[in-house]
Image (tube, coloured by chain):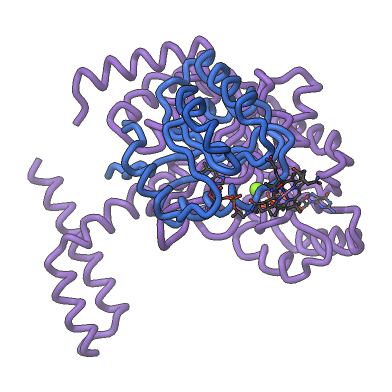
Chain colours: A purple, B blue
Amino acid sequence: MSNSTDLTRAEELSEQLLSGDRRALSRAISLVEADTPAGRLISGLIYPHTGKAQIIGITGSAGTGKSTLVGSIAREERKRDRSIGIIAVDPSSPFSHGAILGDRIRMQDLTSDSGVFLRSMASRGNLGGLSETATAVSDLLDAANFDVVLIETVGAGQDEVEVANAAGTTVLVANPGAGDDVQSMKAGLMEVAQIMVVNKADLAGADTAVAQLRSLLAIANFGAWTPPILKTVASSGDGVSELVDRMDEHQRFITVSDHANQERIDHAQRQILALARAVMHRQTLAEATESLLLDMLTKQVAVRAKDPRSAAIELVDSLRSSWSGAQSSK
Amino acid sequence: MTNERPIRVLIAKPGLDGHDRGAKVVARALRDAGMEVIYTGIRQTPKMIAEAALQEDVQVVGLSILSGAHLELFPRVVEELSSRGVDDVLLFCGGIIPAEDIPRVKEIGFDGVFGPGTDTSDVISFVREHAPARA
Ligand code: B12
Ligand SMILES: Nc1nc2c(ncn2[C@@H]2O[C@H](COP(=O)(O)OP(=O)(O)OP(=O)(O)O)[C@@H](O)[C@H]2O)c(=O)[nH]1
Ligand SMILES: [Mg+2]
């Protein structure tokens, strides 16, 4: 698939970004994000240089203050003399596929700090691929020697939730008075978070929100790490220093504590499964839309001769047997 | 599967100019035309704009200015961009730019100048036509 021009380009960009060239890093992110042959080569070339950064996911419903919090965390990390790479993911429009990426607005003062690199990313509606891309881009920032990588995503769908798998530590951001929010978080978001934050703690109801979260956590079954619940005011920076302390504590938990080995294994498995899901989703749908069987099934379902669920199962079964056929013929 | 890379555009407001309606109208129009638009908000220094263009790897930079400071700010933005090696981007602008300044603005490197009453579909065709290709 890739040719020698791609390889030369990939080698050149990889070398440059490893030596701290920000322009090369930026170009490499685009190539990796668009899943080009050169991008795939770069991912492979830089992978041996990854594994040093602390990777933090910041997720939560729209408008909870994630970008503002990312800005405050970044300022705190800079105070602690750490460099920081930020990936801010926003949804693409399902209609035009365009996007307005506005997360920089909340991080203006960080823009001209050479210890900070902020990249906005549109979800591009790529079938289950968001976690794939976020992991790959976070690897680039890691390889480019940033001490901390923060990934902001709106925790809206499964795809966004799975971005958490790119991170070693996931912070879930909620707001006071968002009772429904806390309820709906039970479905998927709670399980992926290692730190819970009630942001906008300057508003009424913060303590109630903390209590609600605590009672939800009480019935959940955690391993050796019980997620702490913190209050922050991202806009003023209150509580952010403690949040960063807790992030560091979790980082130690997953890297040097007695539990670190188990954590590494669990994380590796979560990552593989999330990526496998993404790859499978992409490949299956690509093949399915080209399959003649799909046309046939569509016609049957359209006239109600067959129910859509049976049709879906039939389609997947047929794809699966075509895969195993392909394998045994190799 | 290789994802088609949408055109990435930075829309920025340099200087102390708070008029942001035009910038937002243009940003939305470009989004609706399928582009990825990074909007920085108001009060950007030339340095901030150039850094954002670099980090976001945009191929188009659009400045919106209604304060009258364009002849002072535009050359500095161009300078900051080229000092970072970001010299392969399409530059264009809009807002209040008096007719007599337009030749100078084009000389500085802004290929398109769009004033009040601009139909956003003209802006969209301009970008589609002139945006440099990117792999
Ligand atoms: C609304 C307005 C305001 C609002 C702004 C609200 C807001 N959040 O935007 C308020 C009341 C706050 C305001 C304040 C001021 N204003 Co005023 N304001 C206007 C007014 C009447 C309309 C601007 C507008 O919103 N137009 C609607 C938008 C959609 O049009 P647009 O901005 O022109 O954008 C279009 C095109 O220019 C182009 N475009 C714009 N940007 C871009 C970018 C790109 C990349 C592209 C391709 C195209 C493009 O496409 C858009 C769509 O067609 C203009 C007069 C005028 N007719 O333009 C004065 C005007 C801009 N204001 C003016 C002044 C002086 C001020 C004040 C200094 C007044 C004062 N003394 O307090 C303050 C300064 C505020 C500040 N902090 O900067 C002067 C500027 C004079 C100059 N440049 O020499 C003007 C021209 C009025 C005048 N004739 O004197 N203002
Ligand atoms: N009162 C209060 N407002 C806050 C706080 N943090 C953020 N906000 C405001 O909440 C709004 C949304 O903030 P963002 O940081 O953009 O939220 P977000 O979660 O990144 O939003 P999306 O990316 O659109 O999902 C802004 O108006 C912020 O100023 C806080 O601690 N207290
Ligand atoms: Mg945000």
- For the point 32% across and 24% down, the residue is A41
Q: Position of residue B113 (x, y in %)?
A: 48, 39
Q: Classify residue A232 as left or right of residue B88.
A: right
Relative side of B54 to B40, left or right: left
The answer to whether residue A123 is above or below residue A136 is below
Residue A119, percent across and down?
55, 34
Let me know if residue A117 appears in the view.
no
Q: Quadrant of residue A107?
A: top right
Taking the spot 68% from the left edge, 27% from the top edge, the residue there is B45
Q: Quadrant of the C terminus of chain A?
A: top left
- In the image, what residue occupies the spot 63% across and 53% down? B21
Decide which of A242, A13 is in the foreground and name it: A13
**Most distant residue in the front direction:** B100
Between residue A139 and residue B83, name the one nearer to us.
B83
- Please indicate whether residue A44 sits to the left or right of residue A54 in the image: left
Q: Where is residue A310 drawn, in percent x and y?
A: 27, 78
Identify the residue shown where x is 57% and y is 38%.
B97
Report whether residue A182 is seen: yes
